[in-house]
Structure formats: structure tokens, C-alpha cells
Amino acid sequence: MRQLFGKIFFAGLITSMTCLGLVWASIPDSVNLAPRAAGPLDCGRGKSRTPISVSFRTLVVPGRKSVVTYRRHSLTADLLTSAVNRTLLLSAKDVVECARKSALADMAAFSFEGNCTAFTFREKLCNCLWGAKVIYLTDSSITPPKFVNSSAAPYINTTLGGVSAKQYNLLGFLLEEVSNNNVFQLKDENEAVDFVADSHAYIVPHEDGGYTGVYFFYFDLDSCLIDISCGRHVLLVAKYDSVVHHVLTECGKIIQVPADLSSALVLYSHPGVGCRPFPDGPHYNCTVTLTSVKTMSISFENVDFMGATGTCDGYTLSVRHNPNGAPIEKKLCLEDFSGGDGDDIAVTLSGTATNKTAKLGFLFRIWIA
């Protein structure tokens, strides 16, 4: 049975590992393995076995003294080379066997790209790694960063095509494959400089030399900056001020929008739009209300929440406003909403995710009309 399982699992694993392990979607969410129980006379028969969970993002395997958990990350080859202080080549036919042997050897990390290589490091890595190389790391080999706003975040002075800029560190960046009226993929530094000159935007460099330009309101910058120098970088030629709120962390809140609001207020779905995915919860029922003594205007931006079918993965997202004192409610997963106005605006997110598909979130922009 073990041999049959190994053949079936390995065949499915090889099918899934297109492009050297960078495509993993077809690996099942979890598979139970049953390692042999210890015992000199047992030979793996007749005793109970403890299931070990194997996930396509996480590998949990028996180690020398205890169970070891490896989590999937990605990083650049240069970072791996500079961080490693010991490399161990292991004989393994698949990623699961590679994980087992790495754990038994007390190794902090491993990669499997046809061959099994395990690693230890000079110091802890940050958990905002990024790059093309897939690697599995133990939690103890990672230092979690702290989030800081732009006024306290560390930065270095640099240039972008001869233009002065500040380089900050990001937890991550999820807009690299997005291309719409707010996010632009730029092939080189000249395009990046021209884009910044013509728009209020931030620039995120790619590993391959390209850039992503994103309008400032489309990226919840202050919820994405971290206090350590790792991960992705963002270049700021200028910092654009806005008043920021979040639906999921401000359920039931009434926000008084000042009559002299000079910049736009941005209401994001959750902290970290652009660097952190939308967090599916067991059930949401959140309403945020905005009021003002003056008329407000509101616009909606679907970063990546509705999906191709416009179903919002089972959620209901609505906005209510009162132009000329008459309330109007729009169900945004079912109806188009080009914008509206009023002195009392309410945004409601409710329901439960049907499939828990990956979503980036949404945002509303509010300003005094």
C-alpha cells in the first residue's frame, strides 16, 4: 500500500511541478501519510500509525526529536547564496522524501527541483522573501517584520532615472500581474520616470529589471511598509497624503468626514490592499458609515474582489448614498456603480466565502464634492 501510495502521489506531484516547482495549484490541499511506528519487532505492521499532514504550501514531517513544519516561500537565488552557511545534498525521489530527510538532518530549509538540497543559515531570514526560487523554511529560521507607517519606516535615498527617490521595504507586492487603469507594467527605468512625472504614483521594481507603477490610492502603502530591509522595495518620488480607513477593522464605525477635507479619504476592504490578500473569515457583517455636513462624492474600485463572474465569491458588497436626500442602495457584486454622492454614505460587506478563492480586495474613494 505504501508503494502504491508513493507512486500515485509522486505522479501527481510531478504533473503539478511545472516550471521547476513554480506551479503547485493541482497538488491537493492535504494528504495523510502514515509513518511507521517505532519498535524493533514491529517492522511497521500491527501498530497504530500517526497521520502526518502534507499540504501544497506546508510540509509536516517527523524529525529526529519532534515533528518539523516546513512552509513554502520564494526568494532570489542571490539571497539564498549569501545567507547559506551549510549545504547538504540528499538523495530523494520527491519533495516529501526531501522534507523527511531534511528534518532528520536538522536542516532549517530545503529545496527540491529534481534534486534535494537542504540548508542552514548564518542568521534568521525575514518572512517577506520574494523571488523565483521555491524553498521550504522552518518557522524558527524566519524573523517576522513589524509594520510601520511611512513617517517611521526606514528608507534609503536613491534615484530613479536621475530623479531623487526614497526606497522603502514592503512586506510583499501583489499587483505585479495586474494591469488596469490604476496599475501599469513598465518595461524600463525611462518608462518609470515618465509615469511618475505625469501621475501621483509609486514605483515597485521587479527582479527582472521592469517596474510596476501604481496610483497612490490603489495601494495601502502604510499597511505594507516594514521595519527591516528585506522583501520587495517601493520607490517614492513623493508621498501623497490621504485619510485611510478599513472596512474589516472598523465594523460599525461612523466616520465624520471633515468639511475641509483637502485630500481624498480612502476606505480599503482590509489593511494591506496591494500587499496582503483579502482575509476570508467565517462570516462577515460589517458596515462603515461616513457622514459630513457637506455633500460627499464616492467612487468604487474593484482591485480584485468580484472575480471574472462578478460573484464576489459568495459575499455581498453594497453601498448606500442619499443624493438629494433620497437613499439609493447598490449591490456592487450584481450592479454597476460608477459613483454617487450624498451627506450620508454606508458601505456594507456581509456573507461567507463560497470557494475562498484568492482575492486582493477593493476600495472606495470619498471626497468633498
Image (cartoon, rainbow, N blue to C red):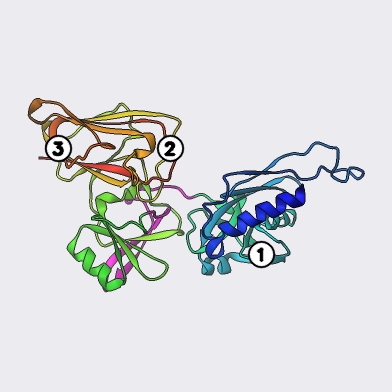
Could you give the CA–CA distance between mark 1 and mark 2, rounded to whole angstroms?
A: 35 Å
Q: Which residue is mark 1?
A: 117
Disc 2 is placed on an element classified as loop
Q: Are marks 3 and 1 in contact (CB under 8 Å)?
A: no
Task: Give the label, 1 or 2, closer to the camera.
Answer: 2
Relative horizontal placement of residue 133, taking residue 225 as reference (left or right): right
Asked which secondary structure carries label 1, the reply is strand
- Label 3 secondary element: strand
Residue 136 located left or right of residue 303: right
Label drawn at residue 296: none
Amino acid type, callout 1: Thr
Q: Residues within 10 Å of mark 2 (few under 14, many from 20)?
A: some
The residue pinned by badge 3 equals: 340
| Residue 208 percent across, percent down from the top left | 41, 70
Q: Hey, which quadrant is residue 293 in on the image? A: top left
Instruction: List x then y, in percent, for residue 162.
Output: 26, 74
> On the image, which quarter does residue 119 sit in?
bottom right
For disc 2, the marked residue is: 280
- Residue, x 18% and y 34% (percent of image)? 257
In the rendered structure, are the residues bearing label 3 and label 2 in contact, judged by CB atoms less than 8 Å apart? no
Given residues 348 and 153, the one toward you in this image is 348
- The stretch in magenta equals 145-174
In terms of sequence position, does the residue under pointer 3 or pointer 1 come before the other? Answer: 1
Q: Is residue 184 above or below residue 217?
A: below
Q: Earlier in the sequence, mark 1 or mark 2?
A: 1
Pick the front one: 138 or 115:
115
Q: Position of residue 105 (x, y in %)?
A: 74, 57
- Quadrant containing the C terminus in the rendered view: top left
Q: Is residue 299 visible?
A: yes
Based on the picture, tell me whether residue 157 belongs to the magenta stretch: yes
